[in-house]
Image (cartoon, helix red, strand yellow):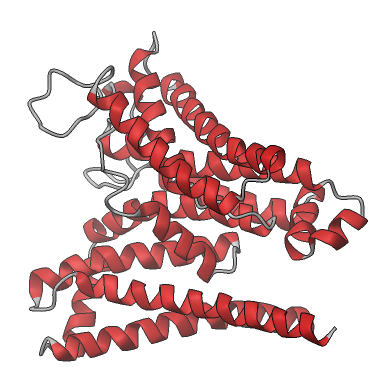
Amino acid sequence: MNKIKMHISGIIQPLIAIFVGLAVGTIAILLAGESIINTYREMWNGAFGSIYFLSNTLERSIPIILAGLGVAFAFRAGFFNLGAEGQLVMGAVTTAIVTVYLPFQGVLNPIVAITAGMLVAGLLSFFAGWMEQRFQINLLISTLLLNYIAVLFAGYLVSEPFRDTSSAGGVPQSVMVDEASRLPKLLEGMNVHFGFVLAIILTFVLAFVIKRTTFGYEVRMLGQNVFFAQYGGIKRKKVMFISMLISGMLAGLGGSVEVMGMHYRFIEGALTTPQFAWTGLMAALLANSNPIGTTVIAIFLAALDTGSLGVERNTDVPNAISDIIQAVLILFISAKFTFAFIKSKKKEGKK
């Protein structure tokens, strides 16, 4: 019975958050003097109204899903990985550089380049875990600050040693990926690419690992109660290192597939400006770190972004409507953690 209540609570909480977000969005629409039904219809059409718009929504969701899965996995083990943005960027820039300098092109090229990107991103996350273990540097702080180092370092790489000097564009970018090594598109002439299939497969793999494997059991136990887990023989250090490595690799994969399937090069700011990593973090928190829930909410958040562009095109409501709804969702998450914190403090006080 308790399990059923937990599952229902896990579904109801994000639904309430989304409902409140849409309700606040409704107020903004009324203030803009537009029809609520017409605006939300345009938002739906902008996200799912045709194969083309659906393709754009699914493509946008890919880095959000993968960054969200990475963050969710670390959260399940009780560790905070706020460095998904830096890991996503390092995965992307590594892949963009490796793919160009490999002595061969074709099917094997993206496999090697993406693996390299995932490993570098995973090691960045692993490094934060090592600093926590070795110097007691809080993961919240180290992963957050490593974002700045990673983003600035990637910007330097494509501004100086690996810049595409043949391009007349003003934005620093790497050399274009060879056509033979690009990830295939799922639909001819559309944006969505093979990275979406990878994201869905990894969603179910991660759900299986967490629910059905010994390591997943250790991750869950450590995330629920660290003292109980250690008393039961679970090694915190081992689980932390593996969890942080996997978390970083998943976020890095989000950047790698964006390079190989969408932009075909690393462009400075292309992965940070859309806030993919932070949106993924929001999806993971709303879904209580459930992999399948994270993916569903990531697609919803991507639909808000693409749908808001349709709203701006066809109504007088600006696309900031998406930001307003997402801001409410962030407030909901903050309130949830604040209540949980107050509740735990009250429990400690009673003991």
Relative side of 258 to 15, left or right: left
Above or below: residue 67 compared with residue 150: below
Query: Looking at the image, which is closer to me, 248 or 261?
Result: 248
> Residue 196's spot in the image, x, y percent?
42, 48
The reply to whether residue 52 is visible in this rendering is yes
Query: Looking at the image, which is closer to me, 297 or 331?
Result: 331
Relative side of 244 to 170, left or right: right
Relative side of 90 to 245, left or right: left
> Residue 179's spot in the image, x, y percent?
27, 24
Relative side of 158 to 328, left or right: left
**Outermost residue toward the top?**
103
- Quadrant of the image for the N terminus? bottom right
Above or below: residue 333 compared with residue 218: below
Residue at position x 54%, y 41% in the image = 248
- Quadrant of the image for the C terminus? bottom right
Name the image quarter holding residue 326. bottom left
The reply to whether residue 254 is visible in this rendering is no
Name the image quarter holding residue 290. bottom right
> Residue 276's spot in the image, x, y percent?
37, 53
Name the image quarter holding residue 170. top left
